[in-house]
Image: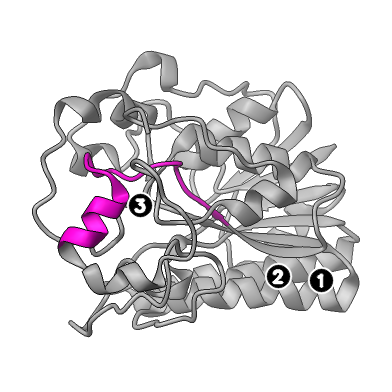
Amino acid sequence: MKILITGAAGYIGRYLTWQLEDRHDLVLADAFEPDDSRVPWIFEPLNLQRKPEYIPKPSPNHPFHVGDALDMDFIRRITEGVDAVIHLTGNRDSNERPIVCYEVNATGVFKMLLACEEHGIKKALVASSINACGWFYNRVTDRPRNWPYLPIDEDIPPDIEDSYSLAKYSCEFNCQAWTNRTGMTTAAFRFAGVFPPEWTESYKDRVQPTTEWPGELGNYVELRDVVGGLVKAVECETLPKFGVYQLAAPDTILPEPTMEIIERFRPELLKVVREPMPGRTTMLSNKRANEAFGYNPEHHWKEI
């Protein structure tokens, strides 16, 4: 299969390229050239050092295109002749550059799917976000988050305050519209906070006891599980025609059992717990992704 990966010079894109390049013909694209010396932004706030064994070194033999994710001529050029697209291009500047953030994350997806239609591409996977629902990050106000049920799944009603979340929510509707319009298989992926393997392997030495309710539900997912999920989805011959899929780790970042955290800090939520969460089980459901393409996250920082 010939697969286009956009955002290919980025954190997830380079690792995904590494995992797919021996199995498929790849076409790579980004706004800038890949650079082995570039350290992904996530390492600085996490205070992590990279390990050589986890630094992707993809082959230089794949065509690499540098261009603007909003340039329709560029998008048409890079989509020509491919069988599937994994669109990872995005922008996180919700508060600093809200218009740019919205345009890249929403209009960029619209243009990519339009080009897929024009070239008869049959499958498009798109990076949404755990925050497409608006509940986790980038909150502008201090309105309380009264979670309607736990564990959270893809059907949680949106509560959006920022351009990033709004754009990601919009990109999911773009996917559904193009499936309705053309019969193309589309999927939007709500990644939890994507942490590198170096974090998973070191966090147990730095974790602190929980002293307050985790507003983001202690969510995360390891890079290797995100990439593994994307690989399974793009190769899945029975992938549903359209779907939104949450990809989370099997556990939380919290050292205490999940039900103990709820009972201690938000006991009123006990009545909305809809299924068992034994041990340190995640408060985000992976059920839909598991049923659709066999997503089964394996990487966590402590025994669950």
Q: Is residue 182 magenta?
A: no
- Tell me, for residue 179, which label it has, or none: 1
* Residue assigned mark 2: 175
Kindly report the distance in space between the C-alpha atoms of the residues bearing marks 1 and 3: 30 Å
Quarter in which the N terminus is drawn: top right
Q: Nearer the viewer, residue 4 or 46?
A: 46
Q: Amino acid at mark 2?
A: Cys
- In the structure shown, which secondary structural element does the residue marked by tag 2 occupy? helix
Q: Amino acid at mark 1?
A: Thr
Q: Quadrant of residue 231?
A: top right
Labels 3 and 2 touching (C-beta < 8 A) = no
Q: Which residues are magenta?
A: 246-264
Q: Position of residue 218 (x, y in %)?
A: 29, 52
Q: Nearer the viewer, mark 3 or mark 2?
A: 3
Labels 1 and 2 touching (C-beta < 8 A) = yes
**Up/down of 63 relative to 112, above or below:** above
* Residue assigned mark 3: 219
